[in-house]
Image (cartoon, helix red, strand yellow):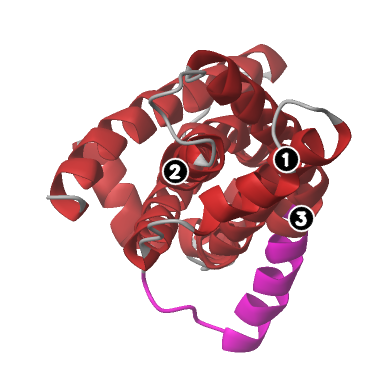
């Protein structure tokens, strides 16, 4: 933990050349964020459809209003799936990418070459990744919400389980705007955890290709555990 904190102190220093930082920032936003849009879109649509089906099957009761399926689908997608579950999935894609990339730079002595030139290598390599993904992950979170609800709408449109009118009415019923902001706040924290932990494991790799793979695995596992821990803490703090 102490080593991680020392590493983040080095990462969070002001860049020496802002022009190079912004060039790297745009590149990382595209590589880590924009390239994740297809994955987020596909998973969210199918998960939204599955949630809608399961809600309809499990709350089939004359005592429960018909629009409850849409309402339950909305709450599950917004409160947990679009932020926590999606971040766990992105930890596998983005986290392993960062850890393996930085780990490869370490074992091929590229980081040593940067340090010899008098550049803060942690700041130069890691800060654009952390800032870029933290800035873009709210976009992925909102996109996941929309696509998850759209997946449920496909079930309402193309099956006879629930009518589209009741599904839309359920989505609109008792809507709490704070839940959306709550999900976005959690996604920002999770984005920081994914990038910083993965960069830490990659930066301190020693050995060869085998150790790079092991660091990538440890980064994903550690990120996932920390995301779940942060999810409990943030839920307690933000929804009291």
- x and y percentages locating residue 129 in the rendered image: 58, 58
Please tell me which residue lies in front, 171 or 61. Answer: 61
Q: Is residue 110 visible?
A: no
How far apart marks 1 and 3 lie (CA) works out to 40 Å
Is residue 216 positioned above or below 145 on the image?
above
- Which is nearer the eye, 42 or 64? 64
Badge number at residue 31: 3
Main SS category, magenta section: helix
Which range of residues does the magenta coloring cover? 13-31
> In terms of image quadrants, where is residue 101?
top right
Label 2: how many Cα within 10 Å (few below 14, some 14–19, many 20+): some
Q: Which residue is mark 2?
A: 75
The local secondary structure at tag 3 comes to helix
Disc number lying in front (1 or 2): 1
Q: Mark 1 — residue? A: 163
Please tell me which residue is depicted at 67% across the width and 29% down the height of the picture: 47
Give the residue drawn at x 77%, y 33%: 155
In the current view of this chain or complex, which residue is farthest to the right? 158
N-terminal of the two: label 1 or label 3? 3
């Amino acid at each position: 933990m102490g080593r991680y904190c020392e590493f983040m102190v080095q990462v969070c220093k002001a860049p020496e050349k802002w022009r190079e930082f912004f060039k790297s920032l745009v590149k990382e936003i595209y590589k880590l964020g924009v390239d994740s849009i297809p994955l987020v879109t596909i998973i969210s649509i199918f998960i939204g459809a599955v949630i809608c089906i399961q809600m309809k099957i499990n709350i089939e009761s004359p005592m429960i209003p018909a629009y409850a399926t849409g309402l339950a689908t909305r709450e599950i997608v917004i409160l947990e799936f679009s932020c926590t579950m999606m971040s766990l999935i992105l930890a596998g894609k983005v986290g392993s990418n960062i850890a393996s990339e930085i780990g490869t730079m370490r074992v091929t002595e590229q980081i040593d070459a940067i340090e010899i030139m008098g550049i803060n290598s942690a700041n130069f390599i890691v800060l654009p990744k952390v800032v870029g993904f933290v800035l873009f992950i709210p976009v992925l979170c909102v996109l996941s919400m929309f696509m998850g609800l759209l997946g449920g709408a496909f079930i309402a449109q193309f099956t006879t389980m629930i009518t589209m009118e009741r599904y839309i009415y359920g989505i609109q019923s008792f809507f709490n705007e704070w839940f959306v902001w709550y999900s976005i706040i959690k996604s920002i924290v999770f984005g920081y955890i994914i990038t910083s932990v993965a960069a830490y494991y990659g930066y301190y790799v020693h050995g060869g290709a085998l150790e790079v793979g092991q660091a990538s695995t440890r980064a994903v596992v550690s990120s996932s555990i920390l995301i779940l821990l942060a999810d409990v803490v943030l839920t307690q703090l933000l929804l009291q």
